Image (cartoon, rainbow, N blue to C red):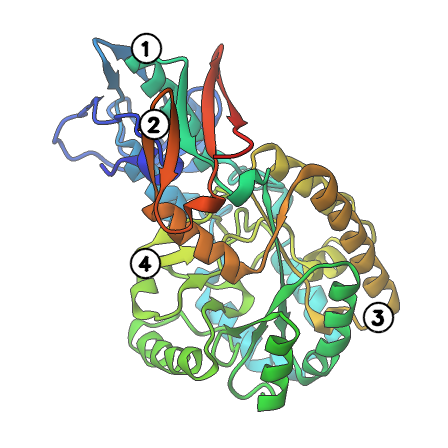
Amino acid sequence: MWNILSDYYKTPLDSAVVCPNGNQKLDAGFFRFGSYAVCYGESLGGVAPDIAGVNNFSASGAVGNGEIRLPFDISNVIDNLRREHYVQHLGQKNGRLTHLDAVREAYYTIREGLPVWVRRYLQRAYLRNWRSLPFPHWPVDFTVDSLHEDYLRLAMLAQGCNKVPFIWFWPKGASSCLILTHDVETHVGRDFTPTLMDIDDSHGLKASFQVIPEKRYEVPTSYVDEIKRRGFEFNIHDLNHDGHLYEEKDEFLRRAKKINEYVHKYGARGFRAGAMYRNQNWFDAYEFSYDMSVPSVAHLEPQRGGCCTVMPYFVGNILELPLTATQDYSIFHILKDRTNDLWKTQVELIKQRNGLISFIAHPDYLLDQKDRALYESLLDHLRKVVDRDGVWAALPGEVDQWWRARREMKLVADGSGYRVEGPGSECARVAWANLDGDRVTYSVEKSL
């Protein structure tokens, strides 16, 4: 078990007091921890083979003699959720649909020849049962974040602490973080990029552009240079966006090598796979710094699942920046929603948990004046949220740099208080986790 408190909170609180749950090999499955968190892994209290039976098995933690007693390995559960190891065990009805290889292959074979309205009809049919999916929790899932808070609470009780320091999640005490991203699907979206940069700039916001390096369209040097010159970010979007990136390991490795070549060619640090397809167990083949292909909740994606967190996390040496807000395409064409209500709800929920608010808006889907007006209305709202609530509006690459720096920082006792040491620590803030009944609340010092 890694030190999950040090990994997530960067706190000196010792979590090595956890009682082992034995060396016996158990079947993995679903169970609840407390009244809320859905867990997937091994548990001495028993597990359900699929999500339908999760309420029949509940685990709880206890403290005594300075120890935390758990009937499961919480670090393993967190890893299973973040890396989506639970997905294939959700049950056939509610599980990932991308295992239907014949359906997916047939769709991508004929996709280019299908009228847009036909593609949208097929996509809505494919996703028609999304409202009935019990897990992850819609519209934003905080299971991993709740597990960390519950574990911290137990550690504080075990140590007899009502208050413990940690390094705050975001620089300069920002309440949350906002990133905007744009996936460029076609040459039409590529040609609309300058206009979209104008729109973002008019609201004082910058974004990253994920660009497909092969087959879909040409990527002129002048296009790359303009994005960078204007202070936006240039990233790689899949290889050719054909839906087959993760289908077979040897072919994936071949494609990953070419993706890495484009990463170095363009000086890109970030990546997103086409259609949010992903296999985090294969990420070690990549040479970029951060990935943005894993949704917190993937009910409206062709690959179901989700990492169940609104915080960045490391997969090996790659930082995952999860998608935490619903894609514009899904809102416009799957939900057929012409309001910002869902986006606003997600923003508020994520802010309450001090998480990463991340959006995808495709230049290809903002050509229609009504869709563009809806996006600009979203930017108006985000600008107000940033200014009013102290949210850090950043480029994905800046979040990557901060999260890597924070990982190396240390919290050091300094007389009657604490200070943060390490490169970049001038932007760090000391925060406090406080026991409030059966809850943990946070407070942040205004300066070091």
Q: Nearer the viewer, mark 2 or mark 1?
A: 2
Per the image, label 4 sits on a secondary structure element best described as loop
Q: CA distance from mark 3 to mark 2?
A: 57 Å
At label 4, counting other C-alpha atoms closer than 10 Å, the crowd grade (few under 14, some 14-19, many 20 or more) is some
Q: Nearer the viewer, mark 4 or mark 3?
A: 4
Q: CA distance from mark 4 to mark 3?
A: 40 Å
The disc placed on residue 160 is 1
Asked if labels 1 and 3 touch by Cβ distance under 8 angstroms, the answer is no
Residue reaching furthest to the front = 415
What residue would you read off at disc 2? Answer: 414
**Precedes in sequence: disc 4 or disc 1:** 1
At label 1, counting other C-alpha atoms closer than 10 Å, the crowd grade (few under 14, some 14-19, many 20 or more) is few
x 63%, y 75%: residue: 184
Q: Amino acid at mark 2?
A: Asp
The disc placed on residue 317 is 4
The disc placed on residue 10 is none
Per the image, label 3 sits on a secondary structure element best described as loop
In the displayed structure image, the side of residue 127 where residue 55 appears, left or right: left
Asked if labels 4 and 2 touch by Cβ distance under 8 angstroms, the answer is no
Q: Is residue 29 in sight in this rendering?
A: no
Q: Amino acid at mark 3?
A: Asp
Could you tell me residue 371's position as x and y percent? 82, 63
**Precedes in sequence: disc 3 or disc 1:** 1
**Precedes in sequence: disc 2 or disc 1:** 1
The disc placed on residue 368 is 3
Q: CA distance from mark 4 to mark 1?
A: 35 Å
Per the image, label 2 sits on a secondary structure element best described as strand
Could you tell me residue 320's position as x and y percent? 44, 55
Q: Nearer the viewer, mark 3 or mark 1?
A: 1
At label 3, counting other C-alpha atoms closer than 10 Å, the crowd grade (few under 14, some 14-19, many 20 or more) is few
Q: CA distance from mark 2 to mark 1?
A: 21 Å
Q: CA distance from mark 2 to mark 4?
A: 31 Å
